[in-house]
Image (tube, rainbow, N blue to C red):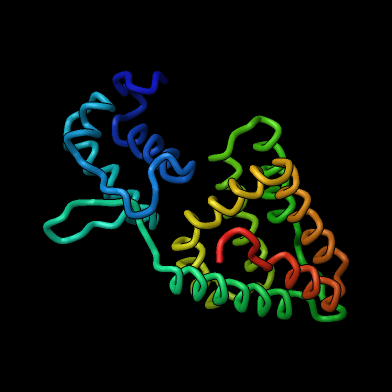
Amino acid sequence: MEPDGELKHPSLVELSTRRLRHEILSGALAPGERLIEEQLTQRFGISRAPLREALRSLGQQGLVEHLPRRGARVTELTGSDVDELFGLRDVLERYAVETALPPSGAHDMSALAKALEGMASAVRLDDPLSENEAHRRFHLALVALAGHRQLLMAYEPVILKLQLYMAANLRREAEQRTPAEGVERHRRLFEAIASGDPATALDALSRHGARTYIG
């Protein structure tokens, strides 16, 4: 699809949503940046109706916020919000690992393994959008190991709000190291959990959760 070409099938809404999501998660559209309908309809070659539906969908995904009488903008959290959400994510993930790994417990690692392979494949293909999605699935699969429905329900909105900032972390990590380092960091966590030893897994999770790029 050409950057400024007219969007066609499978649907204007789907393609508009995909394109805006890519621009937001890639950093081309920054947190807090206004999304002006006139500019976007001209750039995408579409009418306002599919664009507004795309913006509504991205609002449900936590990437766009609609402000009364001021239109839409890329979701922006305060520094305190980001710190609190990452801290909450870490607490919930730690509880999930503690619940999933009793000394004699068994757990299904297939979803976690699939997400990890998705990250690795996306890095090989230089596909940051797919890497971001696989990264989100990895963390969801980690929490799902606990088999705790209420925990997963509490965790999902946290990871939804953080996806933009987690994508920025992966992007900055790739800029300062090699793109594969993010995959290896998650592989180390995967292997620690697969060991079945709670202490090993919790130690790896603690080191994994140290936020170097976003305070």
Q: Which residue sits at x=62%, y=61%?
A: 139
Q: Quadrant of the C terminus?
A: bottom right
Q: Nearer the viewer, residue 154 or 71?
A: 71
In which image quadrant can residue 208 be found?
bottom right
Residue 75, image x, y percentages? 35, 57
Residue closest to the far left: 69
Rendered view: 57 above or below 103: above
Q: Quadrant of the N terminus?
A: top left
Q: Which residue sits at x=77%, y=61%?
A: 189
Residue 13, image x, y percentages? 30, 36
Rendered view: 89 above or below 37: below
Rendered view: 56 above or below 2: below
**157 left or right, relative to 90:** left
Q: Nearer the viewer, residue 48 or 153?
A: 48
In which image quadrant can residue 127 be found?
top right
How many numbered marks have been drawn onto this rendered protein structure? 0
Residue 121, image x, y percentages? 70, 36
